[in-house]
Amino acid sequence: MFNHIQSNDFTDIVKGRRSVRNYDENYIIPREEITEIISEASLAPSSANMQPWRVVVVDTLEGKNKLTPLVRFNTLQNSTSSAMLLIFGDTSSYLYAEEIYNTAVEQGLMPADVRDRQLETISSIFPTLTKEMKVEIAKIDSSLFAMQLMLVARAHGYDTNPMAGFEADRLARAFELDEERYVPVMIISMGKAKEEGYESIRLDAEKITFWA
């Protein structure tokens, strides 16, 4: 990880991020680097460290043609970006609990007794949650991952655009995912900007903060 970072300037990464819709269609991000970006973004936090985010990387003409009728008014991002990243939340992410926690013990990051207590809690709670609660947890955690991915992409020298304008009820099926298990969260386009995104206004902290 962190082998292709172009900038480690936190201020530049955060303040310079823009939603870019038109990319250099001839620029190809190597799959090795896309995998690295996903790995770095996966350092994001999640409930009980279950890491429910799943990513379908669409970087081929065949895949983009399949995606075109599903992205509504976001076809420019689809046709010009190096890749479209379809972010899904896995409502059965707890199935990886033993793998995650056993690896933590093997690497000396967690005592075995802590693992055992955590796994007992996870196995007794997560499977019994309602579908609505599982979806909510998966979406919240996957959104944390998605935001981190956009910042990581910027650190690599790439631009992004998060999108909610797509056919959510058809996305999983179109890419052969289990619709009951995987819930669409957002789509992120990624590439080299052909046109810079515009700077936008944010509300003052005083207007969005309540003290108690």
Image (cartoon, helix red, strand yellow):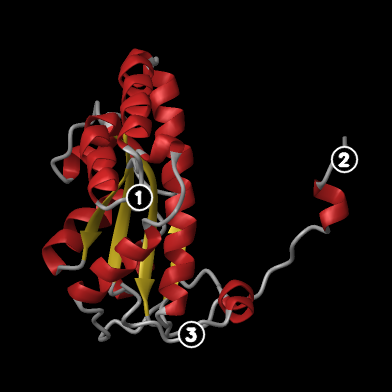
Residue at 87%, 40% (x, y): give it.
211
* Residue denoted by label 1: 109
Residue 59 position in % (x across, y down): 20, 67
With 207 as the anchor, is 45 left or right in this view? left
Kind of residue at badge 1: Leu
Asked if residue 62 is positioned above or below residue 23 in the image, the reply reads above
Q: Is residue 69 visible?
A: yes
Residue 67 position in % (x across, y down): 24, 55
Asked if residue 79 is positioned above or below residue 103 in the image, the reply reads below
Residue at 24%, 26% (x, y): give it.
180
Under tag 3, what secondary structure?
loop
Instruction: Please identify the quadrant where the C terminus is shown.
Output: top right
Residue at 66%, 75% (x, y): give it.
199
Under tag 2, what secondary structure?
loop
Q: Quadrant of residue 120?
A: top left
Front in this rendered view, residue 5 or 136: 5
With 102 as the anchor, is 88 left or right in this view? right
Q: Residues within 10 Å of mark 2 (few under 14, many from 20)?
A: few
Q: Residues within 10 Å of mark 3 (few under 14, many from 20)?
A: few
Instruction: Please identify the quadrant where the N terminus is shown.
Output: bottom left
Judged by depth in the image, the label closer to the viewer, 2 or 1, is 1
Residue 116 position in % (x across, y down): 31, 27
* Residue denoted by label 2: 211
Q: Are marks 3 and 2 in contact (CB under 8 Å)?
A: no
As measured in the structure, the alpha-carbon distance from the residue carrying label 3 to the one carrying label 2 is: 35 Å
* Residue denoted by label 3: 7
As measured in the structure, the alpha-carbon distance from the residue carrying label 1 to the one carrying label 3 is: 29 Å
Q: Residues within 10 Å of mark 1 (few under 14, many from 20)?
A: few
